[in-house]
Image (cartoon, rainbow, N blue to C red):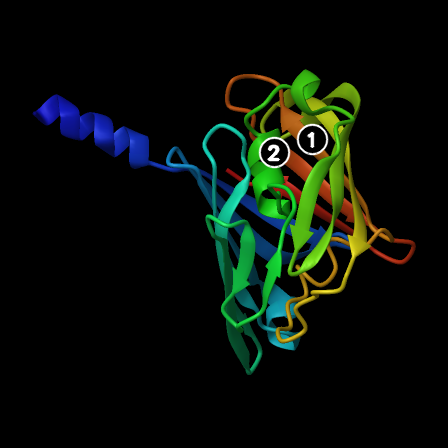
C-alpha cells in the first residue's frame, strides 16, 4: 500500500521550471511553468522590479488536455493587472461545443490546441513528430492554425552549461475571429498570437525536454525568457 501511495505521489508531482523574462536587457517578469503527469499545464506570470512598479501584474493560467493527443479539454485564467481583476474559463463539451463562462458558446469542427497545449506538446514530443505540421488552434474565441518549424540543433547556454537544443519557430495563423472574447484584458494573451511577433523556442533535446529559452520579437521590441533553475 505504501508503494502504491508513493507511486501516486510521483505521478501527481509536476515538472516545474522557472524563467526570467527580459526586455532591452532588463529583468521585467518571472514566469513559472508546471506540467503535471495528469496532463495539466500551469503558467504563473508576475512582473518584477521597475515593471512591477509601473504596471504590477500577477496572472495565472491552468489548462487541461488529452494525455495522448494534447487536445484541449478546458482552461482558465485569473488576471490581476494593476487595479484590474478578472477571470475567464472555457471547456469543450461532449457535443464539441466551446463553452465560455461569459455565456458565449460556439461549435467547433475539430479538436483544438491552445498556446498552452502546444507548449506542453513541444516539451514532450520529438521534432520529427511535430515539425511543419499544422494544428487546429483556438485563442479566446479566435480559430486558426499553428505549427512548429524546426530550424536547427544548436547549443544554448543555461547559466551553468551549454545545452544541445532543438530550435523552433512557432507560427500562429488566425482565420476566423467571429467569436473573439472581448471582455478581458490580458497583455500576454492579447499579444502572443499576433503575426507581428516572431516566436522562437529552444527545447532541450534530452529526456527532460525543458524549454531553455524562448523569444518573441516585433519590429520594435524583443522579449527573451531564459530558464532560471
Neighbours of disc 2 within 10 Å: few (<14), some (14-19), many (20+): many
SS label for mark 1: strand
**Residue matched to label 1:** 202
- Provide residue 177's location: percent of width, then percent of height: 77, 61
Q: Earlier in the sequence, mark 2 or mark 1?
A: 1
- Provide residue 69's location: percent of width, then percent of height: 54, 30
Residue 227 in sight from this viewpoint: no
Report if the CB atoms under discs 2 and 1 are less than 8 Å apart.
yes
- Provide residue 127's location: percent of width, then percent of height: 68, 20
* Near-viewer residue (223 or 148): 148
Position of the N terminus, as image quadrant, is top left
**Residue matched to label 2:** 211
Q: How many marks?
A: 2
The residue positioned 45% from the left and 32% from the top of the image is: 67
The residue positioned 75% from the left and 42% from the top of the image is: 145
- Provide residue 83's location: percent of width, then percent of height: 55, 83
Which quadrant holds residue 28?
A: bottom right
Residue 195 in sight from this viewpoint: yes
Q: What is the number of the mark on residue 189?
A: none
Cα–Cα gap, marks 2 and 1 = 6 Å
Neighbours of disc 1 within 10 Å: few (<14), some (14-19), many (20+): many
Which quadrant holds residue 4?
A: top left
Amino acid at each position: 500500500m505504501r508503494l502504491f501511495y508513493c507511486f501516486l505521489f510521483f505521478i501527481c508531482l509536476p515538472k516545474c521550471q522557472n524563467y526570467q523574462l527580459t526586455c532591452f536587457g532588463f529583468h521585467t517578469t518571472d514566469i513559472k511553468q508546471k506540467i503535471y503527469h495528469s496532463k495539466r499545464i500551469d503558467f504563473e506570470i508576475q512582473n518584477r522590479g521597475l515593471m512591477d512598479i509601473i504596471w504590477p501584474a500577477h496572472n495565472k493560467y491552468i489548462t487541461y488536455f488529452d494525455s495522448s493527443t494534447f487536445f484541449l479539454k478546458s482552461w482558465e485564467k485569473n488576471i490581476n493587472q494593476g487595479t484590474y481583476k478578472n477571470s475567464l474559463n472555457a471547456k469543450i463539451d461532449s457535443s464539441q461545443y466551446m463553452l465560455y463562462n461569459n455565456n458565449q458558446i460556439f461549435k467547433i469542427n475539430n479538436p483544438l490546441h491552445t498556446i498552452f497545449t502546444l507548449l506542453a506538446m513541444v516539451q514532450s514530443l520529438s521534432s520529427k513528430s511535430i515539425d511543419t505540421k499544422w494544428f487546429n488552434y483556438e485563442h479566446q474565441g479566435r480559430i486558426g492554425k499553428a505549427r512548429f518549424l524546426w530550424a536547427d540543433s544548436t547549443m544554448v547556454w543555461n547559466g551553468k552549461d551549454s545545452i544541445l537544443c532543438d530550435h523552433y519557430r512557432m507560427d500562429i495563423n488566425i482565420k476566423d475571429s467571429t467569436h473573439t472574447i472581448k471582455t478581458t484584458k490580458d497583455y500576454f494573451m492579447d499579444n502572443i498570437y499576433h503575426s507581428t511577433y516572431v516566436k522562437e523556442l529552444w527545447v532541450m533535446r534530452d529526456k527532460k525536454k525543458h524549454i531553455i529559452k524562448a523569444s518573441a520579437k516585433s519590429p520594435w521590441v524583443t522579449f527573451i525568457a531564459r530558464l532560471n533553475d
